Every structure is written in structure tokens, then in C-alpha cells.
């Protein structure tokens, strides 16, 4: 045994993040964000069933800049998780494992997320 202090397994100090690892981590994070967003949605529905006063309170909170920021984040999480999930379904079918295809499909997920988020918010804001 030597006295050197070094990691025994691959470590964040040794490897720099790659597109595939970053997208995988983001897929997990967006799944957690969607759970939190679902709880807020349940809060909003319960407020609607509880009466006009409480619903107005919750609606005021959701209409604040913090509420809009969280709604925007949840919409990004929703579209990212959707697109990454479709990518995983393609992989489950046995396609798209070539290195260049993995990279292209990863960037396609990022581009589709941005496009779908912008479209949803543009349509939603124009309807207001």
C-alpha cells in the first residue's frame, strides 16, 4: 500500500462533464421538479375547491413574479423530461447508440425543449 491520497474510482476532479452525463443528471432533476410542480398544481386545485377567498390568495401567489418564474421552470422541466423520455424510448427500441447519434439526439433534446417552452409561453401569454 502506498501513502498517496487519490480517488479510488472515477471522480469529478478527474473527468469533465460530457453531454450525455449532463443530460442524464438533468433528466433526474427535472423528474424531481415535476413532482414538486405537481404538488403545487394540487394546491391550486384544492384552493379552487376551497372557496373564492383562498383561491384568490393562491392565484395571486401564482401570478406573482416568483410564481411565474416557478411556472416557467416547471414548463422547461416538463418539456425537457418529455423530450429526454422519448429519446430513452428510442434507445429502449435499440436505436441511436452510435456516438455521433447520441450527441445529435442530445442536442436535439435541448433544442426541442427550448422550442416547445418558447411556443407554449408565447401561445399562453398571447391568450391572456
Image (cartoon, rainbow, N blue to C red):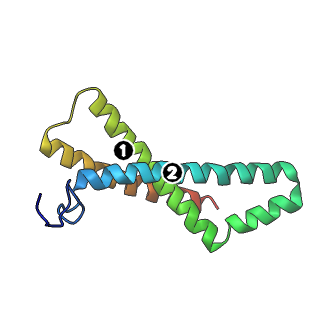
In this image, 2 relative to 76: left or right? left
**Residue extending furthest toward the front:** 1
Tell me: 116 left or right of 95.
right
How many marks do you count on the picture?
A: 2
Name the secondary structure under disc 2.
Answer: helix
At 88% across and 54% down in the image, what residue appears?
51
Image quarter hosting the N terminus:
bottom left
User: Which residue corresponds to the image point at 39% horizontal and 40% vertical from the top-left?
Assistant: 85
Front residue of 31/65: it is: 31
The single residue placed furthest to the bottom in the displayed view is 65
- Whether residue 119 is visible, yes or no, is no
Query: Where in the figure is residue 11, as x and y percent of width and height?
Result: 23, 59
Q: Is residue 45 placed above or below 90 in the rendered structure?
A: below
Residue 5 position in % (x across, y down): 18, 67
Vertically, is 24 above or below 71? above
Considering the image in quadrants, where does the C terminus appear?
A: bottom right
Q: Which residue is mark 2?
A: 32
Residue 89 position within the rendered picture, expressed as x and y whole percent measured from the top left: 34, 32
Q: Nearer the viewer, mark 1 or mark 2?
A: 2
- Write down the quadrant of residue 10 in the picture: bottom left
At numbered mark 1, what does the secondary structure look like: helix, strand or loop?
helix
Name the residue that disc number 1 marks. Answer: 84
Question: At 57% across and 57% down in the image, what residue appears?
Answer: 124
Amino acid at each position: 500500500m502506498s501513502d498517496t491520497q487519490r480517488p479510488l474510482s472515477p471522480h469529478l476532479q478527474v473527468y469533465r462533464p460530457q453531454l450525455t452525463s449532463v443530460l442524464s443528471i438533468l433528466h433526474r432533476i427535472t423528474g424531481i421538479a415535476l413532482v414538486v410542480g405537481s404538488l403545487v398544481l394540487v394546491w391550486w386545485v384544492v384552493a379552487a375547491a376551497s372557496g373564492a377567498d383562498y383561491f384568490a390568495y393562491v392565484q395571486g401567489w401564482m401570478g406573482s413574479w416568483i410564481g411565474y418564474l416557478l411556472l416557467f421552470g416547471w414548463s422547461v422541466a416538463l418539456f425537457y423530461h418529455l423530450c429526454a423520455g422519448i429519446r430513452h424510448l428510442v434507445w429502449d427500441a435499440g436505436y441511436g447508440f452510435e456516438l455521433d447519434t447520441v450527441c445529435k439526439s442530445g442536442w436535439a433534446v435541448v433544442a426541442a425543449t427550448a422550442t416547445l417552452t418558447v411556443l407554449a409561453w408565447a401561445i399562453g401569454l398571447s391568450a391572456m
